[in-house]
Amino acid sequence: MNLPRKRHPDIRIFLAAILLGLAVLACGTSPSPAKDGGASGRAPTNAPASSSCLQDVTAGTTTRQGLIAALGTPAQTEVQDNQEMLLYATTDSGQYHSIVVQNNIVGLVSVLLDENAPLVWSTVRDQYGNPPITTYSYFLEGTRTYVYPAKGQAFVASPDLDIVYARECFVPMSADDYMSSWGSSLPTENPFPK
């Protein structure tokens, strides 16, 4: 499946809603950093990042029907034009994974990582190298969004705490295509001014 190369006028609003929703959810029950860099007193795992964000769900391949078969009925859905965002509850109360379906195919999978098995940012960086795109994040103060467009991966991480809080999987694409589609609503300035 090819994602649209030209920015759809409504995709920015749709993606901004996703990011704002994740930021609001994160602010409500976000994990508190521990002295060892872990979340809620648990040490982050050194396991490498897999190529899939959710088991049995692959961006660009999984159909909406396959998504429902794999994950069940979503907690909530929002529809806009030919895009649908499905929200699935995480193991953390009040927080959700979001999946965007375009033309009946999963286009973007955005997951909040389980605080019982967080991912270490430096391990991801060692595995993938320096990210071609780094920008600010709406998620939590001090986090950044690190994007590997050719690998179809993006991570919201705290470089100071060396932990990944959220991860996105999408169809691999060029940096320009990513920034004109999924990355079009990422902040270019710090959204948490001091």
Image: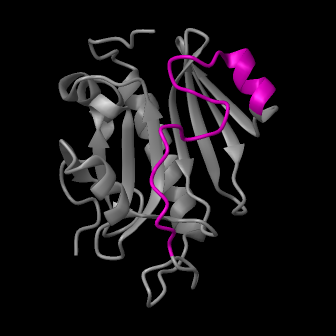
Q: Residue 48: within the magenta? A: yes
- Which image quarter: residue 92? bottom right
Whether residue 75 sits left or right of residue 102 in the image: it is right
Q: From this viewpoint, is residue 137 visible?
A: no
Pinpoint residue 149: horizontal percent, then vertical percent. 29, 32
Q: Residue at x 69, y 53 (%)?
A: 90
**What residue span does the magenta drawing correspond to?**
44-70
Picture colour scheme: one colour
How many discs appear? 0
Q: Residue at x 46, y 30 (%)?
A: 14
**Above-or-below relation of 166 to 6:** below
Q: Residue at x 76, y 30 (%)?
A: 70
Q: From this viewpoint, is residue 96 visible?
A: yes
- Which image quarter: residue 73? top right
**Above-or-below relation of 46 to 43:** above
In the foreground, 89 or 10:
89
Quadrant of the image for the C terminus? bottom left
**Above-or-below relation of 86 to 79:** below
Q: Residue furthest bottom?
A: 35
Q: Residue 28: within the magenta? A: no
- Which image quarter: residue 77? top right
Magenta span: helix, strand or loop, mainly? loop
Q: Residue at x 44, y 91 (%)?
A: 35
In the foreground, 139 or 175:
175
Pinpoint residue 169: horizontal percent, then vertical percent. 46, 35
Quadrant of the image for the N terminus? top left
Whether residue 1 sits left or right of residue 93 in the image: it is left
Pinpoint residue 68: horizontal percent, then vertical percent. 76, 25
Pinpoint residue 47: horizontal percent, then vertical percent. 49, 60
